[in-house]
Image (tube, rainbow, N blue to C red):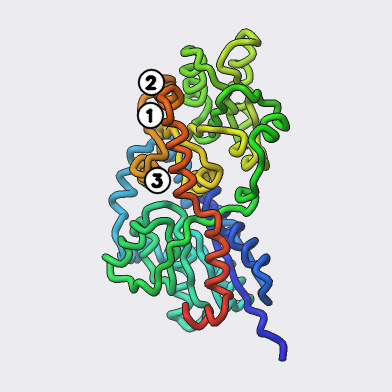
Amino acid sequence: MMAHEMRILALSASVGAGHVRAAEAVEIALQRAGAPVTVANHDVLTLMPTAFRKVYRDAYFEMVARAPRILGWLYDATDKPFHKDVVRQKLEQAGATRLLRKIRDYDPDVAICTHFLPTALLDRERRKGRCRARIVTVVTDFEVHGMWLAAPSDHYFVATEEARAHLEALGIAPAAITVSGIPTHPGFTEKKDRLAMRRKHGMREDLPAILVSAGGFGAGNAGRMLESLMAAKVGVQIVAVCGKSAPLKASLEKMVMRRETDALPVVKVVGFTTEMDELMAASDLMIGKPGGLTTSESLIKGLAWVVVNPIPGQEEKNAIYLLEQGAGVWCDNLHTLAFKVKSVLEEPGRLESMRRNALRLARPDAGQIIAQFVIGSGAAKRI
């Protein structure tokens, strides 16, 4: 008798890349699990009207860039577990016609949500009898904001034991919570020799390497970060990753070209790359904003952190976790960035201790844990 081929639906929302990357990581883990499954993976915002996307996603990015303090206030104001915002839910429902039709046609056995928007939509569909899927929520930050709990889920995958304790204190059954970590692409779990990666990417073998995630800062702040480090003549090499921002890359490259070729620090500017795992493997220290996915990827590679200007709300919470666990320091003033970096590099044993702590926190098996729970022996009945 042939085994039933389970239909699994992974749903994310591209409010930042992390939610989408987490869904992709889970999809890969499911496909590699060796079980008879069919997996569909959708960024729900691509199936929503343009006007909805502009309000839901573009307004968020605009607020990050221009009014981060307001974003932090909204984060705190909406941190209300189990609170149903009727107006917001009606707007989401009104924009989800195409998405919901696709979900009904697919008729999944299990839906895995890496953002709270699809969780809320699926819960309403299920209550109306239009969806039979069991709902699994994968929280993609180190703290569980109340929005993740606005609609119920059958099972929660969280990043830390503290997050589990939080949910249990709110009355969620312990059996409905798994501490998995945040799922990352399996490429980050591959062991890659540091010196080999430095040679491949044109980096020096004799200098500590700092990986700067510059894309989240914009040209002004990213430039000031580099200026601070260059002015202090810190004896390191810096790889500044600009993502898809061509203007930012051009701005930083122009700044670097004005320097003497043998000056320290050595600076290499990189645009969009699919080899972030290799750059992390080649590096010792990361400077940037601690998004949930980026942080999880870096911990697997054993990188210490210098957190700079985290987004108020979830990134600040992620930063606090790194500091509490001894894997990072916080720089809230770009004028002291070089001082922070030097303090980590020059204090005997400090960088090595921070890197050990990072590896202790790493959860390279998060995607596998989620996949095994969903499609393992009898898992579908246990959710």
**In-front residue for pair 95/272:** 272
**In-front residue for pair 360/200:** 360
Instruction: Where is residue 230? Give x, y as percent.
Output: 51, 15
Residue type pointed to by label 3: Asn
Crowdedness near tag 1: few (<14), some (14–19) or many (≥20) residues, C-alpha within 10 Å: many
Which quarter of the figure is the N terminus placed in? bottom right
Q: Left or right? Give the position of 275 relative to 92.
A: right
Residue 219 in sight in this render: yes
Instruction: Where is residue 333? Give x, y as percent.
Output: 36, 24
Q: Which residue is mark 3?
A: 318
Q: Residue at x 72, y 87 (%)?
A: 2
The reply to whether the C-beta atoms of the residues labelled 1 and 2 are less than 8 Å apart is yes
Crowdedness near tag 2: few (<14), some (14–19) or many (≥20) residues, C-alpha within 10 Å: some
Q: CA distance from mark 1 to mark 3?
A: 14 Å
Q: Left or right? Give the position of 211 relative to 149.
A: right
Give SS at disc 3: helix
On screen, residue 300 above or below 7? above
Residue type pointed to by label 1: Cys
Instruction: Where is residue 175? Give x, y as percent.
Output: 39, 74
The reply to whether the C-beta atoms of the residues labelled 3 and 2 are less than 8 Å apart is no
On screen, residue 73 above or below 204? below
Dividing the picture into quadrants, the one containing residue 171 is: bottom left
Q: CA distance from mark 3 to mark 2?
A: 21 Å
Q: Which residue is mark 2?
A: 336
Q: Residue furthest front?
A: 348
Give SS at disc 2: helix
Give SS at disc 1: strand
Instruction: Where is residue 235? Give x, y as percent.
Output: 53, 17
Q: Residue furthest bottom?
A: 1
Residue 331: give its label: 1
